Amino acid sequence: MFDGKRYKKIAKLQLKNRRSATVLASLVVLALFYILIVPGRNVLDDSGVLYKFKYLILLAWAFVWGATAIAYSYLFIALSHTTEEQPFARFVQGFTRWLDGTLAFLWCRLWITLWTCLLVVPGIVKGYAYSQIYFILAEHPNVGVRKAMNMSKVMTNGHKVDLFMLDLSFLGWLILCLLTGGLLFLRAGPYYMMTKTNAYHCLKDEAIRSGKLCEDDFLEA
């Protein structure tokens, strides 16, 4: 049974005295966000020299955010499997999966964009349907990107509203992050990701128990 409050409570316990690597990783994520989001705004107009770099920026987004998303997920997956502190090197190690991360980003963006062209709501729904892809790839390196997407769709079936409400429960944190110029993300980011990691494990276990997926699905490409 999906229980967002429980996942958040457990996340606080999991992060107790184990925040150093998560804070450093969140600082990297925040820095990359500022490095890419500002140029990204400048190239939205069709005038000026900067427009020529529009597609380069888009490619940079795909590479950097895909690689960072899987590395960030890799760190929290590691934290969820042990009570020991994880070194910052664990986050860095996750970047070795950059290709899977980039392909996952591009593949998800493609389908979300196509669904959004129909209506905004279907695009949001598909965003939640694909939301587990980075966790799957981070925990199970032998699973391919397309299969991970399909498995994510199975795992989130019937739980998209639950995932949306879980995200909504962090709205206050998001507002505070914006008011502090993103600095509070160094604390809220790890809390959010640890909670989402717990939700991922719940969705995975439920899918296996119900027979929608089996253990072998997470072992084979």
Image (cartoon, rainbow, N blue to C red):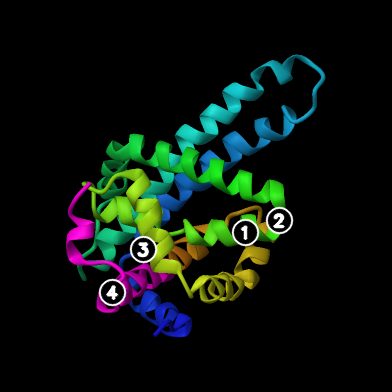
Query: Within 10 angstroms of label 3, few (less than 14), some, or many (20 or more) residues?
Result: some
Q: Who comes first in sequence, dot 1 or dot 4?
A: 1
**Residue bounds of the magenta highlight:** 194-221
Query: Label 3 amino acid?
Result: Arg
Residue 22 placement: quadrant: bottom left
Q: Answer whether labels 2 and 1 touch (C-beta < 8 Å).
A: yes
Q: Amino acid at mark 2?
A: Val
Q: Secondary structure at mark 1?
A: helix
Label 3 residue SS: loop
Residue 9 on image: x %, y %: 41, 82
**Residue 194 in sight from this viewpoint:** no
Q: Which mark is residue 124?
A: 1
- At 79% from the left and 27% from the top, the residue drawn is 45
Which residue type does callout 1 highlight? Ile
Could you give the CA–CA distance between mark 4 and mark 3, rounded to whole angstroms?
26 Å
- The residue at the point 22 percent across, 67 percent down is 214
Q: Quadrant of the N terminus?
A: bottom left
| Residue indicated by mark 4 | 205
The one nearer the camera, 204 or 14, is 204
In space, the residues marked 2 and 1 are separated at their CA atoms by 6 Å
- Is residue 193 shown above or below 115? below
For the question of whether residue 189 can be seen, the reply is yes
Q: Position of residue 40 (x, y in %)?
A: 66, 33
Camera-side residue of 162 and 212 = 212
Mark number, residue 120: 2
Pointer 3 residue: 19
Badge 4 marks a residue whose secondary structure is helix
Horizontal side, residue 131 vs residue 183: left or right: left
Q: Between tags 3 and 1, which lies in front?
A: 1
